[in-house]
Amino acid sequence: MRFFSRLVCPATRVGSVLQKELRREIACCQQHLKYCMVAVIKCLLSILLFIDFYPVKMIKSSAKIASQTPKTTEGILDAVRDLARGYFHGARGSHDWDHTLRVCRLCRRIGTAEGVDLIVVLTAAYLHDIGRSCQDDAGGTVCHAEKGARLAESDLEQLSLSENQRQNILHCIRSHRFRGSHQPRTPEARVLFDADKLDAIGAVGVARAFLFAGEVGARLHSDVKNIEETRPYSIDDTGFREFKVKLCKIRQRMLTGEGRRLAEERHAFMEKFFNRFLEEYRGER
Ligand SMILES: [Fe+2]
């Protein structure tokens, strides 16, 4: 019996150890299964949250953009004024932000008298000289009206305007230049053209002509015989030269009734000023 019990007991002990190992393995497997299930549930939740969250986020974002886009006339004009002002940091005094604001005031006055779309003409007025620094930096070889229209395209996308209004504004900018190749075809373009030219004549025009001459390093006056042979952006690009080659011709180019009336008055003052200027320069008075 003792002999048998010595043979059976080790077998029983081995079986018992195996059972314990098996139970431990099963418990371990159950634990892993729990972890797996938790991971699967987390994955499913993430997918569900993504599907649910993303469209909501997009809708919220679109609503936010829509709420930031101004719809009223004054809201649009405030937005375009802020956009345009950014182009004038460090601009030269003769074509700075103040010139743009004077042109806007004239556009409002002439535009009201002519009964044009004020959103179009004022938006174009704010943006009309945003390409000016490119022309000045290139010594006059770049057309600021063409450049300005190209720059304005992306700015106009941000405003609540119809496609017709956008195209009209771009045309206004492109055709506002006195020496440009585009003729103003719309009533709004004619108003901007006149307003911009009016700011080049009269007392303000004379002051700006001498300011520009100073910016390009010109003399106070150049006594050359043939002014047509002198070059722009040179030492001979004086205030009087500007009067002879451009400013004295502006009143004949006006395109609106109100513009013509204001131009006649400003031209008369300018002629009187330059006559006196030459008399004083020659020592005659
Ligand atoms: Fe201008």
Image (cartoon, grey):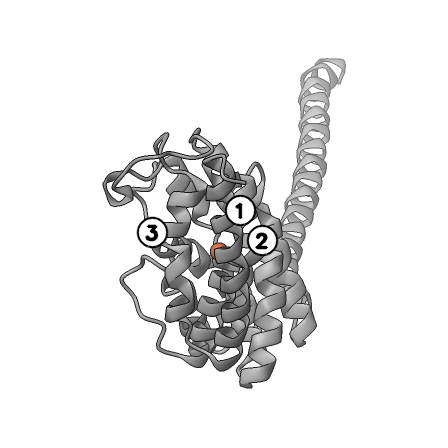
Mark 2 residue crowding within 10 angstroms, few (<14) / some (14–19) / many (20+): some
Q: Is residue 278 visible?
A: yes
Give the Cα separation between the discs numbered 2 and 3: 17 Å
**x, y percentage for residue 55?**
60, 66
Measuring 53% from the left and 82% from the top, which residue is drawn there?
Answer: 116
Pick the residue in front: 220 or 193.
220
Mark 3 residue crowding within 10 angstroms, few (<14) / some (14–19) / many (20+): few
Per the rendering, the mark at residue 204 is 2
**x, y percentage for residue 159?**
56, 67
Per the rendering, the mark at residue 208 is 1
Mark 1 residue crowding within 10 angstroms, few (<14) / some (14–19) / many (20+): many
Question: For the residue marked with disc 3, what is the amino acid?
Answer: Val
Sequence-first disc among 2 and 3: 2
Measuring 36% from the left and 65% from the top, which residue is drawn there?
Answer: 175
Q: Is residue 66 visible?
A: no
| Element at label 3 | helix
The residue singled out by tag 3 in the image is 245
Q: Marks 2 and 1: in contact by CB < 8 Å?
A: yes
| Element at label 2 | helix
Question: For the residue marked with disc 2, what is the amino acid?
Answer: Val
Q: Nearer the viewer, mark 3 or mark 1?
A: 3
Q: Is residue 167 above or below residue 267?
A: below
